[in-house]
Structures are given as C-alpha cells and as structure tokens.
Image (cartoon, rainbow, N blue to C red):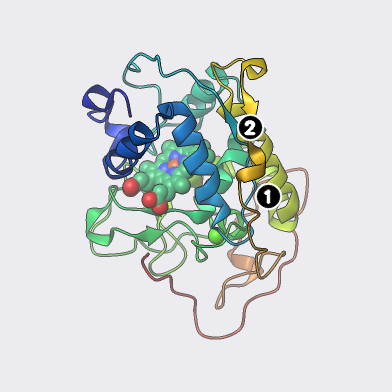
Amino acid sequence: MAHSDVELAYAENVGVDDIVELQRPVALRYNVSFGDFIQFASAVGVSNCLGGPRLEFLAGRSNVSQASPDGLVPSPGDSVDTILARMSDAGFSADEVVALLAAHSVAAQEHIVTSIAGSPLDSTPSVFDAQFFVETLLNGTAFPGNDSNPTFEAKSPLPGEFRMLSDSLIARDSRTSCQWQSYVSDQARMVSQFEAAMAKMALLGQDASTLVNCSDIIPTPQAAAASVATLPAGKTMDDIEASCAETPFPTLKAASGPETSVAPV
Ligand code: HEM
Ligand SMILES: [Ca+2]
C-alpha cells in the first residue's frame, strides 16, 4: 500500500492493485497505519465467510516501511521445495504453510487464466471449510474453460473449478500431505490452526508488547452449514489420490444429485 509503485509491478502481486487502491484512501482518511489497516480489513473480511476464523487484531504498527525486493512471495508455478524454503525463511513450518492455505477455501483465481476469471479453488468459495482439502486430492480430469496455463495450473476434478499447480503439489508432497489430509476430517482444527498461523503472520517484524489487542471489535463469523467435508456429487472414494503414507484417507459421504459444477464468483 505504501510502495505500490514498486511492488505492484511484481508478477506475484498481479490483481492486488484493486484492493490496495480501494483501501489506501480509507487508511489515510482515518490516520491508521497501512499495516494496521490491512490486518484489520483482513480479519473483518474473513469473518464474513461462513465457518470463518475469528482472527486476532492487534493495533499500533508503525507506518515506516521499505519496499520489498522482488521474488519473496511464492508463485503458483514454484516447486514445493521453493515454497517451503521461502515460508521457512519467514519462520513458518510446513504444517503452518498448509494451515495458511485454508485461505484457498474462500478463493478464486482471476489472473492465471483470465478467460475464466472468478473460477473458485473449491466448490464452496463463500464457506471457510475443508472442501478445499478434499477437492485438491481428487483426480484431476480437465482444465476448466477453453484456455489453460499449465505452468501455474493443474487439471481440476470439477467443471468450473480451478486447481493451482502449487496447491496440487503441496497436497501430494510427503512433507505436507498428512497435514493436508488431516483437515478433511477435522474442520475445527483447520480453523484453529489457521487462526494461530495468521496470528503469527500478523506479528512478523512487530513487537507484540508495543501493540494493543483490539480483537474484541472483530465480528464472530456465522457457523458453516456442515462441519464435515463431503465428496462432491458424482465422485467416489476411488477418485481420491490419497497421499499420506501414514494414515488412510477418511471415508467421506458423497453429496447426492447431478455432478457438481462450480459457478464463477
Ligand atoms: C503458499 C503459496 C501461495 C501461492 C503460490 C498462492 C497463489 C495464489 C494465486 C495465484 C491466487 C489467484 C490470484 C488471481 O488470479 O487473482 C491466489 C488467490 C488467493 N490466495 Fe493464495 N497463494 C498462496 C498462499 C496463500 C496464503 C498463505 C493466503 C492467506 C493466508 C492466501 C490467500 C488467498 C486468497 C484469499 C485468494 C483469493 C483471492 C480472490 O478470490 O480474489 N494464499 N493465491
Ligand atoms: Ca470452501
């Protein structure tokens, strides 16, 4: 927000321009530091998702910052090695990377394949649930839309659903697959580990003792309709590419009805 002239030119930040331009004048009008504003808006934003986490919000970050060098944010075309190494530089374990990726349960892509902008990463993009962790493990059958971008994209299992290459690889990598699978049968743990990892991210480069805990003002999200993930209609357990060597994949009920297809958001 402070260095958009430099940082918005980085490939990984494509698409962040809209929200930066919308939020900057609000932060300036209310004399809130950009760091605090981004943390506050994120916590309120994600609380609007059904089943969402209730994130901590600590206020008091300084508005003094420097532009980031290029190449620090992972790309969907990066290897799992590269992504885990980058996240480890910032203090995150492989388990915490998986926890953070629960955010892709309420996500869509716009810029990897622009002709299908708005294609969600799971079938329930307004619900913060474990469907993302199930659906990324289904056998990928086709690219949605008429174009594909195989440098950044993997085949998805459902019409209209988009699978990022990095999510596909992290779901299947031996360092991350058991944590990935564990969320399938434990959505509550997914939410609490996401909250913990986000609390850690919110304090990167900060001294918590100088911040004021204003978490009371963050709304409590409404519960998700289901607390247990399902197989999308039309899929069977045979379609799951179970990737955790230690624990069998949990048996899931299949949703009834015609094959699930995912509408753009
Ligand atoms: C670890 C490596 C990650 C990679 C490679 C990655 C990559 C991406 C990409 C390429 C998109 C689509 C952007 C577009 O086309 O407009 C996206 C969407 C999104 N990502 Fe990630 N991401 C990662 C981790 C995270 C984390 C840690 C969070 C939050 C804690 C996050 C939250 C989101 C959200 C909320 C969206 C949806 C944005 C929207 O619907 O407009 N991602 N991610
Ligand atoms: Ca979801």
Assess whether mark 1 and mark 2 are in contact (beta carbons under 8 angstroms): no
Q: Where is residue 108 shown, x and y percent of the image?
A: 40, 55
Residue at 62% over, 72% down: 236
What amino acid is labelled 2 in the image? Ala
In the structure shown, which secondary structural element does the residue marked by tag 2 occupy? Answer: helix
Q: Is residue 233 left or right of residue 38?
A: right
Q: Where is residue 252 shown, x and y percent of the image?
A: 71, 68
Residue at the right extreme of this rendering: 247
In the structure shown, which secondary structural element does the residue marked by tag 1 occupy? Answer: helix
Residue at 62% over, 78% down: 255
What amino acid is labelled 1 in the image? Gln
Ligand 2 shows up in the quarter that is bottom right
Q: Where is residue 193 shown, x and y percent of the image?
A: 70, 40
Residue at the bottom extreme of this rendering: 257
Residue at 61% over, 46% down: 218
Q: For residue 199, which numbered disc appears in the image?
A: 2
**C-alpha separation, residue under disc 2 versus residue under disc 1:** 23 Å
Total labels: the figure holds 2
On screen, residue 15 above or below 136: above
- In the picture of the structure, the residue carrying the numbered disc 1 is 181
Q: In this view, does 12 lie to the left or right of 86?
A: left
